[in-house]
Amino acid sequence: MTVREKIERLRAELRAEGLAGFLVPRADEHQGEYVPPRAQRLAWLTGFTGSAGLAVVLLDAAAIFVDGRYTLQVRDETPGDVLEPRHVTDSPPADWLRSRLRPGDRLGYDPWLHTIEGVERLQAACARAGASLVPVPVNLVDRIWADQPPPPRGPIVPHDQKHAGRPSPDKRREIGDLLATAGVDAAVLTAPDSIAWLLNVRGDDVAHTPVPLAFALIHRDGTVDLFVDPAKVTPGLREHLRDGVRLEPPDALGPALDRLGAGRRTVQADPAGAAAWVFQRLAAAGATVTRAPDPCLVPKARKNDVELAGARSAHEKDGVALCRFLAWLAREAPRGELTEIAAAARLDALRAEEPLFRDVSFPTISGAGPNGAIVHYRATPRTDRRIAPDMLYLVDSGAQYLDGTTDVTRTVAIGTPTAEQRDRFTRVLKGHVALATARFPKGTTGSQLDVLARAPLWAVGLDYDHGTGHGVGSYLSVHEGPQRISKVGSAVALQPGMILSNEPGYYKAGEYGIRIESLVVVVALPTPPGGEVPLYGFETLTLAPLDRALIEPALLAPAEVAWIDEYHARVRQALTPRVDAETAAWLARATEPLSARPPRGGAGP
Amino acid sequence: MTVREKIERLRAELRAEGLAGFLVPRADEHQGEYVPPRAQRLAWLTGFTGSAGLAVVLLDAAAIFVDGRYTLQVRDETPGDVLEPRHVTDSPPADWLRSRLRPGDRLGYDPWLHTIEGVERLQAACARAGASLVPVPVNLVDRIWADQPPPPRGPIVPHDQKHAGRPSPDKRREIGDLLATAGVDAAVLTAPDSIAWLLNVRGDDVAHTPVPLAFALIHRDGTVDLFVDPAKVTPGLREHLRDGVRLEPPDALGPALDRLGAGRRTVQADPAGAAAWVFQRLAAAGATVTRAPDPCLVPKARKNDVELAGARSAHEKDGVALCRFLAWLAREAPRGELTEIAAAARLDALRAEEPLFRDVSFPTISGAGPNGAIVHYRATPRTDRRIAPDMLYLVDSGAQYLDGTTDVTRTVAIGTPTAEQRDRFTRVLKGHVALATARFPKGTTGSQLDVLARAPLWAVGLDYDHGTGHGVGSYLSVHEGPQRISKVGSAVALQPGMILSNEPGYYKAGEYGIRIESLVVVVALPTPPGGEVPLYGFETLTLAPLDRALIEPALLAPAEVAWIDEYHARVRQALTPRVDAETAAWLARATEPLSARPPRGGAGP
């Protein structure tokens, strides 16, 4: 079926149900970033494969809303004459709905695939048009998707204490106490990574993130009901969870919520993460529903010392693989024979040589020339481009090691970069260094720091249309909250042990893309003499050289040069003993102090 | 009557009304910063004269809640054995009430003196204790305040088009259109500065802010009902307002709201500014009440070209007065005979020599040595301190000129500053310069920029406990919203024409205070070559030298030195032709380039 045919089939279902439209988000029941094939309804229906988006299909119109990362991609993948592509913040779904719905219209949605906050926003938009938003018990896409895959059944295994650093009963007691203090009887957990963290387990249900798709209830006494497909339960898991965790099948969740309601319990769920279905079921059963963030979020984000040691070790391994790749690239790329896909395959293979490697943490982004300007580019045979001289090449990649999750972007010049490219790269680097060296009082949020990374671009009228930093898990999600560094306000202060990315960029559509991304961890700094407030800063975890050919020293302050030189010395020291001689020789040149730069031949303004 | 006697009298009223307590905020019906003597109920009842606070008087307990600025002052002014002093954020009124109210208790409040959002917060606190919050038709303090002053009757006069820059009918049409677009029939205006801006009038009802205390209704057709005491209406005003503005007495407001309700109109009011009374009356009358910010806020904040020309002219006048003062201070202070009050009087008198001067824009803060560390210090005969050598002196002052409002802080060293003072001053200055030179894309909020002003202090573990910038009106309030530069998130983007203060500081309790404050205006910058986003920046309006003796050049980057030298050159050029020879000679020395600094004798680390 073509996209047009699928949309027409969906419209037939709409007419049969007396609906004016149906919402198709790129979301599963867990609001996870990676969704199993079964839940790829948006991609199946529209062709759009990005990691965030919403299609709204009305009887006589249809649109697909994506964010700044995907405005180019959506035009490539989805027929614009069937679904109108729209920028989700410039022209939000609420506005589009308000102008198209008519009084009395009923717009359908699947209450498992939307958060309660999302539902309420759309309800308000419908109400302004005199229309209503109605939950639909069976997803209408599932009805027309003949060969929809089954739910995944990845085995759930214990996560070793030597990597987790803290026993699960300890964690459960902490969360139970938090609930008791808040006067709450139980919390519904719908985020697989929260459940994985809480129980020290890992799963294999979705790509690149070692989590089990599951739901859980944690009670104020610290006991847990875990709702999972019995087929996923390994014998080792039963042993691991033997005290205080009850295993139940997924369809026992509804009745469990009903019992809480019948007992007039106060139950907490995350309005930004849990499915609207959870709130609706609890309320219908008579529970007092409290909206509060997932109680595991902050404890999970604050990595313990064992997790931090693991992160440092994971980054050494990752640095070895990336440096071997970059050295190889420096040798091979000038011949002009490499392609994006071949390069990504090589990098993935080098990472896979590490014994603790389990998976890449997301599909490697390997973008040459103009493809580097597509923020979440993924090379396909159709788009695969040769990495040729006089091009910038951007590679954003990471891995899941048993002891930690990595995520790193480096941009390198193949051949001679232009003066403009060096200017832009150096401005991105200045922002990266400003954040890496930031010192800030306890209580500061990532939103307050965001400007530091953007100011050097802003100075010349440039910017980038994505956040500056996202949280990263510990052998868990490569994107985790609540910490972030972003233009958007955040109420969560940065705390020691939180890992985040530091990734400013610059993208010139149709020409080149630049991003410099390292992971950092929030650390408490010693109070300087005379200092009055507790001070935090960042330690950079990622170990990989920054392309000196792209750095314009005239744009750097002495302190910036010093930071880059010290960083390079640290990279060299950490990785040289662990790489082959050829890579070590490349690494020695790549990490020379900026002052040692030999006169450049062909390049320059 | 003593405070104790007044509290006992109030309790007698409580018993007569069957109330468990009564709330006495430092607020008037307009939630203004300056309140008329009649509305100084908190000061009359408790003795506390700060600009923000709340007393809660129960039958068997009483407390007064103040913020961090006033924790020392409240202990001075209010008997602690009658009203327990409490920090409003560390131990909020809601917590205190929750632990003291009993089920069934009725806590009274005057619905004219609280916003609807404030009432709802307190209602929730009462509900948790099983108590209720009830509006009281006549303020109980008014009943026992025998010699309560009458409401002010300052004449209302037209604000000349040559200063306002835009005819009132234009403004009214713009606001009316905004309401029509939002589907609203009318908006209730309770902020005197919004009414003054909208109608191009000024008043004389409160100290330091030339506004008339009044209420208004603006309808979607752009017509206005203005509710004011007829005694304040001058003949010129009637002429000025003749088209589209209906004058009515204050007690006609209630019936006007009732008529809107009877007509089933949709009426808008500001939940953060309008009295709860407005919402309650509208709802009771049957109106659909929409909560939205005062529609005049943003248009008022974006000064037009005439207002901006006025602001520049006002700042030249203000610079002349301040420079004459600083030159005089440089001659007189080393003798050690000047006091804070005498210095403030001299400065106020110099400002008053300007023909367009109407008032100071707030009581001058004149703080020597440790008094400079009290952020909202006001010298009194009891605290008045001699300005002596080897002290820092902080002076924060401003004026209301017919063509603009000013607000400026300079900190000067009397004699030789210490190395620590020079370090701290230079860090505050670096923050001030970083903000003054910031370039940022359209859509950026002040909250995003706040860190620029703090980073140099954060670097050494220091900070300041106040915002970095507040909006400033045009011959209106010296503190106006919605624009601000603050750690606290803001949803309002900075827009060209908005005037704000740029005022980082550092305060060492018991020793000295440093603040550097200039007003800036948001301006659109030309797009740099290759720039892609519309770029804004700030133009500094304030013209007054920064004390070179407090600047440590070793801490400054070349671009910072260049900005300071250029700023000083601009100050010298603008003011020299307008000051006496003695001041001009001082100004020439005070504005020399930093590189011209003669070797310093006694000072240094």
Image: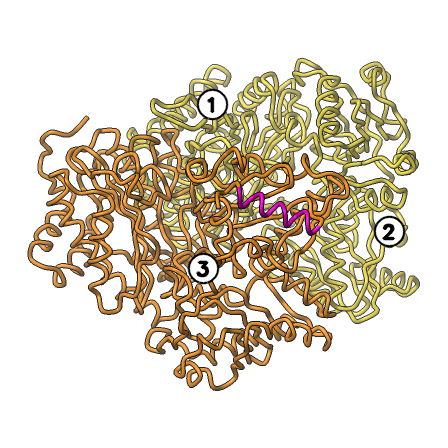
Chain colours: A yellow, B orange
Instruction: Please give left or right for residue B44 compared with residue B256 in the image.
Output: left
- Taking the spot 22% from the left edge, 69% from the top edge, the residue there is B355
Q: Is residue B498 visible?
A: no
Number of residues whose C-alpha sits closer than 10 Å to that of mark 1, classed few (under 14), some (14–19) or many (20 or more): many
Q: Main secondary structure of the magenta part?
A: helix
Residue B11 is covered by the magenta coloring: yes
Residue type, label 2: Asn
Residues in magenta, as a range? B5-17
Which chain is disc 3 placed on?
A: B
Instruction: Please tell me in which quadrant of the rendered image residue A296 appears.
Output: top right
Residue at (21% x, 37% y) in the render: B553
Inspect the image, locate mark 1, and give the three-letter code of the amino acid beneath it.
Thr
Give the CA distance from mark 2 to mark 1: 53 Å
Q: Chain of mark 2?
A: A
Does residue A219 belong to the magenta stretch?
Answer: no
Front residue of this view, candidates B285 and A496 = B285
In the picture provided, is B113 more to the left or to the right than A293?
A: left
Residue A583 is labelled as 1
**Residue assigned mark 3:** B36
Question: Is disc 2 surrounded by few (<14), some (14 to 19) or many (20+) residues within 10 Å?
Answer: some
Q: Nearer the viewer, mark 2 or mark 3?
A: 3
The image position of residue A375, as x and y in percent, is 56, 47
Secondary structure of the residue carrying numbered label 1: helix
Q: CA distance from mark 3 to mark 1?
A: 77 Å
The N terminus of chain A - image quarter: bottom right
Distance from the alpha carbon under mark 2 to that under mark 3:
62 Å
The residue mark sitting in front, 3 or 1, is 3
* Label whose residue precedes the other's in the sequence (2 or 1): 2
Residues at badges 2 and 1 in contact (C-beta under 8 Å)?
Answer: no
Q: On the same chain: label 2 and label 1?
A: yes
Q: Which residue is mark 2?
A: A139
Q: Is residue A307 visible?
A: yes
